[in-house]
Image (cartoon, rainbow, N blue to C red):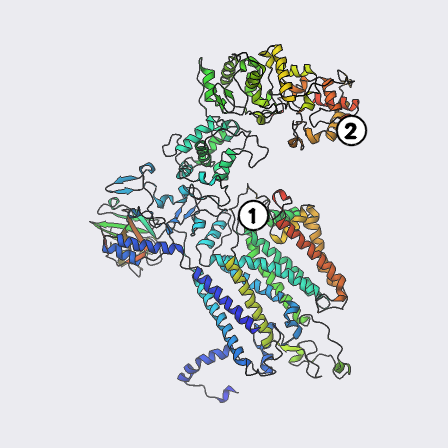
Amino acid sequence: MAVAKESHSTQPASDASMPRRRLLAWLSSVGLFGSVVLAAASNWFFFKPRVTYGPNARFAIGKPEDFPPGTRISRDVERVCIAREGNKLAAISTTCTHLGCIVGISDTGFACPCHGSRYDQDGNVTGGPAPKPLPWFQVTLAPNGELVVDKNSQVDPGTYFTL
Amino acid sequence: MSDATKETPGGLAVLRELPSNVWNSIFRGPLPSTDLERSSTSFTNFFLHIHPVKVNRNTLRPAYTLGLGLISLFLFLILVVTGVLLMFYYVPSTTQAYDRMLDLRGTVAFGIFLRNMHRWSAHGMVAIVFLHMCRVFLTGAYKKPREFNWVLGVVLLLVTLFLSFTGYLLPWDQLAFWAITVGTSIAGYAPLIGKQMQFVLLGDTTVGQEALLRFYVLHVAVLPAVLVLLIAVHFWRIRKDGGLSRPEKPADPVAATGIVKMRKVYGLQGFVRGPFTKVGNVPDDSVYSWPNLLMSELFVFVLTVSVILVVSLMFNAPLEQPVNVMHPPNPAKAPWYFLGLQEMVSYSAFWGGIGIPGIMVGLLLVTPYIDRGTKGVGKWFAKERLMANTIFLTLVTLNIIFIVIGTFFRGPNWTLVSPF
Amino acid sequence: MRLALAIAAFVVLIVHGVVFYDQFFHRWERHQTAYFEQARSLSKNERERAELEARAPRIEQVIVTSFGDTRVDRCTTCHLAADDPRFTGHGEPLKTHPYSTAMGDVFRDGRWERRHKFSDFGCTVCHDGQGRGLETKYSHGEDEFWPDPLAGYVTQANWRKDFAPKLKGVEYMESNCAQCHTATDFAGTPNVNRGRKLFYAMNCYGCHKIDGMSEGTLGPDLTEAGKKFKIDYLWESIVEPRANLDTSFMPKFNLSEADVRSLVIFLKSRRGVNFAETSLDRYKAHVENVAVVIPPGTAGEKAGEQLLADRACTACHKLHDKDGGIAPDLSYEGLIRDNDWLTDHFQNPRSRIPDSIMPAFRFPRDDFQRLSAYLVSLKTPPAAAGAETTYHDLCMRCHGEKGDGNGKVAWYIDPSPRDFTKAAFMTSKPRERLVTSIKNGVAGTSMPPWGRMLKDEQAGAMLDYVLQTFTREPLKELKPRNLPEKNPVAGSKESTAHGEQVFLERCTGCHGRKADGKGPNSLDILPHPRNLRNSWFVDSVTDRRLFESILYGVQGTAMPSWIDYGLTQKDVGDIINFIRNINQKSGSPQYARN
């Protein structure tokens, strides 16, 4: 860290050392700037949690026999309603799309106690302030014979899982 | 350039000029290329105004300061940044803290690396501020007018130690728990107020949830704020004391003629005290802060960061068994910087833990006020300061010896063992 | 400097790059993608294949709160195929978790249904290990700092190498099964059951307390042994009792490796409170201080003999064909001890032999009487034989084959059996004293009164045998010493106080501050310093003998002759008053170990 006798203000650098100095300055800048970019990217990954401590988004609900045709039950912990018609299964979210309350099952479909949103059997909005229909989640059959609902995968409303 | 004489530009011109207008509103001047521009960086930029316009050449000599003060500052910066990042995942609860440490190690992206950086920077900072203190003492840089800055420095050292100590508890593993149990017990030996102090510090009679919470608050909020404040005053004092200490210059033939009077000049360059005026054509051993001081600082920064990065890549911070209050490890050792104390405490609880450390800190604080000699400032191991340096080095060496004994030569039940 | 700056800047960049890279491409991601590919190839329909195609590697976890502290188990992140029946033939980590009817799994409609579902139990509640870890080293508990390594599969680096192979095996998981399945005959925990039986059969219950099972206080409380210690420590503590504590008097029992394994698994299952109990159960058990759960003994003729077997006396003692190798031979007990002695000894061994390590059992009174009655009935003397055979029959067990006091059970007896080869001691005693020791035994010690089964000539013959075979030196002519028969110093308060003072100044180094023979130097001296609170013994020695031992020392032992160190007869008289004073039969029990 010797104090350069030739600080910028006094002498112009000799021609020979100028390219070298430029190269070194460029290298340093690249190194530092690159590190800053990498560090910024790292921070994004750091902040994005890889695990959360709530209930799993992907969970088993039981065997198909546990849901005889005509079943329509709500699982409050996972906030999903399992509906079976014939051999077709659906998992409809019971989180109201308005502001997030848990909707209850009503005769005509679903009803939200918070602000009065109304949905039909398939989750389409029939009244109230809800802006979007209730999402449907993917239902699959795991290799061990249990039905698995995956809240991370949404399917189009009306897409049933056929046993 | 009077705005009144120009027409306000039309719509499209506004859009075209938008980038340069934005840029120029932030950076008012071009990158300096003249002396005037270099000087004005110290006025026109918020971050750079901490610097004087010019600094003495000696200040930038690496062999003089070893950059230790700067390294301490940058380590602190690294600690603050990594510390804040870690705060996003850590929970100061006795039931959750250890599990969160496991998650930081296992699942959080870069968690293990950030923790390593934080740990090694912390140990590094304690060592470096200690070395910085040695450097300042051995170069006599505590003498008038820098006495108060030295006092501030000693207080900074204590705050740094306390920061490291409070942070040591947070992983809530066996290492942390028992180290702090030992450390706070030493504190309890202070006469009259010791037990009360220990109770207030721990929030309870033993280390537990209360202690964890208090240490956490001290570590992330109170002590960093205090440290930042003291560092700011420390830097202010450096400026006001005329920059870093330097060797006395030989008598100036030109100045002796009396043409140049050392009086205040209220020009641009006169804001900085010292013989920096060009009026008398005095030989000038100062250089502009831009770019010399800044390059030095940048270099020290990059060096510090690279060392910490490499060390963090190679060595993992320890995480031992979860806390088991029934089962102290044998031996239970305080953090390394307190091991000297613990070794002394094994001989006498009061003298080793409170008495001698208290005397040593007292001596440190009072040194600039009893050592009033003015000779020998600005160089290492000046002959004129032989006695002061010898006393200081002796005490430092003793402390290091005790720390070494406590680290390597003490085994179960604090008996002497061989480390080989 | 610019060069250095450029280099440092690049170092920073490279390290950032390395760290960045390190944080991705984890091993678990590779396992997951391998699973997706293999599952796709095994898949039988298009829809499943599409789903697998769309899946990206992700940390899988099960959060379990029903079993104690919250557990976060991320094992399925690597072991993704654990619940996929198609992977039974694959290698770990992509292997299906085994199904078995023993674990309650049911095979129905062509497929297995798991009883212990992973979503309910997680993994670590059965397997131990570190649920939160995502690298093998941490998640399997190989890290020495983790208290619960994978049970039966992982040994940690700092465990003893000679134990490591014995500590592997799936049976070690039974300790975890026993947290819920607490029935003593549960088929799934055979080792726990066997260990429990051994706990009684090998007499562990006598010294060790386990809440709800036993009340022994001589050894550490084992109620939470499984929670406090790892299996290597438990194993070591059983096979080498003095490995971690030099002064432990836990006997080294004769146990096979299978026995030790069962005991270790049983002890590892002791966690204080298990999942099958409610907090209320535990509270009640604690408050009521449930007594020993030992079935009452059989009555009738064979009662005593049966009791001896039930109560595992031969875990330590010798009788008939069983020998524990730790305590004296009971074969001739009826000849050398009477009913009173036996009953007292049973109820509190230390009431007769103050330094005995035999536990004080909490049997019902009837049991003690039956046992005593049975032992008293053992009156068949050994066949008449020469001195050598008699020595082998009666004396060798304590005094050793070489007569050096190193018999099979010598270590467990306090005061230690006399070393006959110490000629300095043997030859400095009058013959009558030695013969009396044989005939009347030594009160307060394990030396029984053999005179009750040996005739006088036999006793004399034994002494001769011992002297010739082991001591090998003739008895010395003893100088007559001027010693009073009775203590001339009157037993006053001042005398006793002064005696105590002198004692505290001169004697505590060996005899201990409590005069119990456990002074700091006592561990290094053989024979050990005398326990001066052994009232039986102290009462049986005369004042003269005490004078002699103190003033002129005891040759062949570390007791110096204090007359050479300035003690006068008056001092010694005071000391004797002090000693007698602390041995008054005041009704309170002997200073006992427990």
> Is the C terminus of chain C in the top left, top right, bottom left or bottom right quadrant?
top right
**What residue did someone put label 1 on?**
B177
Residue C391 is marked as: none
| Secondary structure type for disc 1 | helix
| Res B330 quadrant in image | top right
Q: Is residue B384 above or below residue B102?
A: below
Viewer-proximal residue among B382 and B345: B382
Counting other residues with Cα less than 10 Å from the Cα at mark 1, is it few (<14), some (14-19), or many (20 or more)?
many
Percent across and percent down for residue B220 are 55, 57
Please, what is the three-letter code of the amino acid marked with disc 2? Tyr
**What residue did someone put label 2 on?**
C565
Viewer-proximal residue among C16 and A129: C16
Percent across and percent down for residue C138 are 45, 49
Please, what is the three-letter code of the amino acid marked with disc 1? Phe
Q: Is residue C594 visible?
A: no
Q: Is residue C74 visible?
A: yes
Q: Is residue B386 above or below residue C383?
A: below
Q: Is residue A3 left or right of residue A109?
A: right
